[in-house]
Amino acid sequence: MPKAAIIAKLSEVFNVEPKILFEFSHLAPIDEVKQDLLKRIESMNDEQVVLTYKYVKNFVI
């Protein structure tokens, strides 16, 4: 489980409520999820990309 400070920073950077980061039951088919993820990454600024990378590297993979 990520630390509260990381969750707060992610929700700030992505401009979403923290609970949104943990809602997974509404996901679309995997191909759509991958396309959406790539689209979001391409639209991020450098800080968002780095923060996302750190989160994925430390808590997902």
Image (cartoon, rainbow, N blue to C red):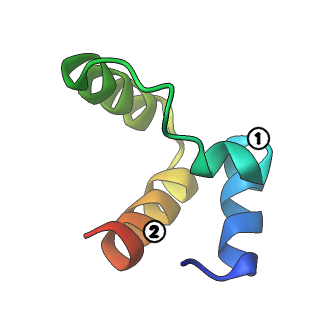
Q: At x 73% / y 49%, what residue is drawn?
A: 19
Q: Quadrant of the C terminus?
A: bottom left
Regarding mark 2 in the picture, which secondary structure is present there? helix
Estimate the x, y position of residue 57 in percent, counting from the top left.
Answer: 32, 72
Q: At x 30% / y 30%, what residue is drawn?
A: 38
6 or 1, which lies in front?
1
Q: Which mark is residue 53?
A: none
Q: Which mark is residue 15?
A: 1
53 or 61, which lies in front?
61
User: Which residue is most to the left?
Assistant: 31
The alpha-carbon separation of the residues under discs 1 and 2 comes to 16 Å
Estimate the x, y position of residue 49 in percent, counting from the top left.
Answer: 45, 53
Three-letter amino acid code of the residue under disc 2 = Tyr
**Residue with the mark numbered 2:** 55
58 or 28, which lies in front?
28
Regarding mark 1 in the picture, which secondary structure is present there? loop
Three-letter amino acid code of the residue under disc 1 = Asn
Mark closer to the chain start, 1 or 2: 1
**In the visual, does 22 lie left or right of 15?**
left
**In the visual, does 33 lie left or right of 44?**
left
Relative to 43, does residue 19 appear above or below in the rendering?
below
The total of numbered circles placed on residues is: 2
Q: At x 37% / y 23%, what residue is drawn?
A: 36
Q: Quadrant of the N terminus?
A: bottom right
Q: Residues within 10 Å of mark 2 (few under 14, many from 20)?
A: some
Say if mark 1 contacts mark 2, CB within 8 Å.
no
**In the visual, does 32 lie left or right of 42?**
left
State which quadrant residue 31 falls in.
Answer: top left
Relative to 47, does residue 42 appear above or below in the rendering?
above
